[in-house]
Image (cartoon, rainbow, N blue to C red):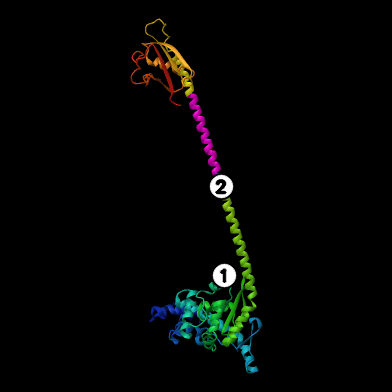
């Protein structure tokens, strides 16, 4: 037999007459079933008219798709606190048979779900988008039962858990099994009950998906439901999202609402504690933020004060440097003037004798009230007059010599383009009173 299988694997005629799609389906079927014989895979697919789903279920001894999710053995009756117990069937033999076949039916249901996921991935070419699974289920639900239902969250199961934890609200999870006998009545009655939608909008979040979809099946495997219709209540307890109630089996609208309200009410204390803890945490965080803000403001104020003090120190240091530079320049200037006085003193001629005909007697009044009296020759230049005043100890550094009658400034300062005139040229008489005016005063 093994040799025949190897021959089949190597026989190129196995692919004769197959389209590209059938060729691909043949390889997918072999991967899915783990069969070694391509010939057997082709015969099985041909017997099922190339229906990959039907052929795979037949090869794995799975029931047909329409009975993929078996109905629960019986309706479930709620225990206090949201737990469930199976209701007693009509007879003992029926109950024993249901109990004995429960593991087998659960195994078949699980394998059926797995095969559904695998086939959907193969057909879709990759993993399904959980949000798309939920959105498509909501669209199908509303197309079948109408838009009157609790507001279903349009997101993945993980996003629903995160939203419930963030908002500190209970989360209702409804797993939809379209093949179950009680599903239609539950959806048309309990889920479309107006008081349920009004209460849910004020109190909690509602998430729903079909177990025939990958996202719904994944949640089904996590919650391990035993019957349908199935609803779980999840709340935040001890900082973990915990299932606190499970409703399984058919239920009348008012009874369904009351049971949900009782479960939510019984677990409200944990949400209140979580809200208080979050409020305290937020208050502490806000207090820390205010303290940090006050610290930052104080730090900025201190930094601003330090910046201003630094600026003031720099200003004072700059002023001190300027003052010292000014003082240095002034000292240099004084030294320069002292040097010039020594040099210019040697250029002052001696006073002429009183009996000389060109002798002129001049009295010069300084700004401090002191006087300089000296004889000059009319042939002396006015710059000699300037040197006499400049070399006097009480003379200002910058000055000019004036005459009151007539009122004029004598051009005696040396360094001009033309040499100063002589005393005779300046019109000075035998006796004159001149004044020194301080130009820096």
Q: Position of residue 277 (x, y in %)?
A: 63, 67
Q: Is residue 379 above or below residue 415?
A: above
Residue behind mark 1? 166
Q: Please provide percent x and percent y for residue 255.
A: 60, 86
Residue 229 point in image, percent of width and height: 56, 85
Q: Quadrant of residue 380?
A: top left
Q: Residue at x 49, y 77 (%)?
A: 134
Which portion, as a residue range, is magenta? 303-332
Q: Camera-side residue: 274 or 115?
A: 274
Circle 2 sits in a helix, a strand or a loop, which is it? helix
Q: In the figure, is residue 283 to the left or right of 143?
A: right
Instruction: Compare residues 28 and 171 and report the one nearer the observer.
Output: 171
Can you say whether 10 is above or below 291 in the image?
below
Q: Based on the picture, tell me whether residue 66 belongs to the magenta stretch.
A: no
Q: Main secondary structure of the magenta part?
A: helix
State the residue position of label 2.
Answer: 303
């Amino acid at each position: 037999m093994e040799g025949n299988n190897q021959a089949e694997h190597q026989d190129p005629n196995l692919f004769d007459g197959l389209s590209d799609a059938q060729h691909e389906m043949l390889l997918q079927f072999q991967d899915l079933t783990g069969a070694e014989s391509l010939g057997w895979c082709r015969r099985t697919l041909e017997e099922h008219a190339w229906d990959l789903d039907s052929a795979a279920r037949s090869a794995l001894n799975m029931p047909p798709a329409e009975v993929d999710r078996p109905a629960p053995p019986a309706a479930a009756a709620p225990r206090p606190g949201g737990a469930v117990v199976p209701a007693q069937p009509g007879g003992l033999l029926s109950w024993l048979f249901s109990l004995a076949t429960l593991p087998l039916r659960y195994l078949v249901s699980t394998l059926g779900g797995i095969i559904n996921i695998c086939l959907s991935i193969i057909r879709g070419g990759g993993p399904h988008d959980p949000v798309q699974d939920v959105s498509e289920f909501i669209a199908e639900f509303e197309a079948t039962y109408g838009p009157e239902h609790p507001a279903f969250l349009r997101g993945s199961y993980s996003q629903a858990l995160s939203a419930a934890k963030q908002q500190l609200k209970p989360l209702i999870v409804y797993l939809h099994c379209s093949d179950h006998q009680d599903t239609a009545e539950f959806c048309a009655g309990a889920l479309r009950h107006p008081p349920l939608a009004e209460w849910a909008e004020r109190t909690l979040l509602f998430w729903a998906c079909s177990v025939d979809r990958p996202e719904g099946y994944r949640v089904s495997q996590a919650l391990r439901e035993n019957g349908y219709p199935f609803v779980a209540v999840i709340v935040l307890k001890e900082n973990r999202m915990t299932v606190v109630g499970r409703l399984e089996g058919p239920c009348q609208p008012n009874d369904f609402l009351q049971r949900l309200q009782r479960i939510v009410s019984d677990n409200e204390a944990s949400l209140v504690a979580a809200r208080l803890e979050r409020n305290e945490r937020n208050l502490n965080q806000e207090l820390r933020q205010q303290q940090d803000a006050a610290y930052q403001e104080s730090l900025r104020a201190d930094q601003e004060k330090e910046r201003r003090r630094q600026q003031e120190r720099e200003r004072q240091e700059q002023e001190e440097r300027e003052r010292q530079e000014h003082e240095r320049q002034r000292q240099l200037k004084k030294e320069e003037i002292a040097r010039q006085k020594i040099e210019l003193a040697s250029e002052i001629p001696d006073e002429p004798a009183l009996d000389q005909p060109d002798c002129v007697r001049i009295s010069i009044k300084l700004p401090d009230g002191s006087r300089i009296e000296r004889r000059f020759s009319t042939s002396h230049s006015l710059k000699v007059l300037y040197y006499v005043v400049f070399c006097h100890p009480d003379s200002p550094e910058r000055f000019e010599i004036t005459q009151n009658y007539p009122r004029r400034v004598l051009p005696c300062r040396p360094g001009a383009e033309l040499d100063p005139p002589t005393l005779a040229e300046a019109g000075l008489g035998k006796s004159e009173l001149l004044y020194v005016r301080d130009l820096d005063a």
